Amino acid sequence: MTLVTVIGRGHSGTRAVSHTLYASGVFMGATINRSGDLVPPEAMYDACRVMARYVEWQGGLSWDFSQLHTMPIPDEFTRLIHTYLQSVLDEQAKHPDALVGWKIPETTLVFPWIVRLFPDAKYIFWVRDPRDCVLNRHITDDLRVFGIDYPPTDDIRLRRAISWKYQVELVKATPQPANWLELRFEDFVLRQEETLARLEAYLGIPLARIVVRPDAVGRYRLDSGRHDFDFFAPELTRFGYV
């Protein structure tokens, strides 16, 4: 299998790795936008809504993902994913030895079933300090857009924080695929050569260097709004942000 994809919430800096792969000659889809997302996204969005039917919200910040790992994957979901990935899968069929892939943050919302459909793909889990992730708008801020229930709130920063928490919990609940690499956006920016060396060893190809901006790290420190939440604490420790 020569597929590679990026797992990470919107505004986690996933465009940096997508642009790196594209600049390195990796086919990332027939059409990608300025964020490095494979577009059009509608089939992926619809696939997210199909999977959400089988996630049980237990109240608060608790969701039951258990049936996602054993139930039959609906044909509707598989059809939508193959529609979304058509150009990538066609390229893979034409060049089976080449590395091809895609990136769109909503892949994270369907991660359990993506792993089951593509168990041999190479997964890059892209992490960023959640206090930076919540500063800017993303379509996944309101999980109800994708059929996912969560505690109602009019606080947009809290919505973003809950979305971040949901996606981290979904990834944690999913059995880790055989090919898995976890990288931090901050390390890519501040220690690019070291981080790219890890990525090159994982993918087995040389990678281009793109321009990075150190001021993209720790932007929350200049933010006057609410950007920290108690439920971030376990992951702040786990990912080495404290």
Image: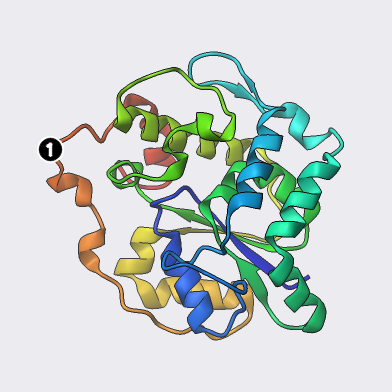
- Residue position marked by numbered label 1 in the rendering: 224
Horizontal side of residue 138 vs 242, given as left or right: right
Compared to residue 162, the image places residue 221 above or below, namely below
The amino acid on which the numbered mark 1 sits, given as a three-letter code, is Ser
Q: Position of residue 121 (x, y in %)?
A: 72, 63
Its colouring scheme is rainbow
x 39%, y 78%: residue: 193
Q: Position of residue 215 (x, y in %)?
A: 20, 62
Numbered circles on residues, count: 1
x 36%, y 63%: residue: 187
**Looking at the image, which residue sits at the far top?**
59
Does residue 178 appear anywhere in the picture?
Answer: no
x 80%, y 82%: residue: 94
- Who is closer to the viewer here, 71 or 87? 87
Q: Position of residue 207 (x, y in %)?
A: 50, 83
Quarter placement of the C terminus: top left
Horizontal side of residue 227 vs 193, given as left or right: left
Does residue 65 appear anywhere in the picture?
Answer: yes
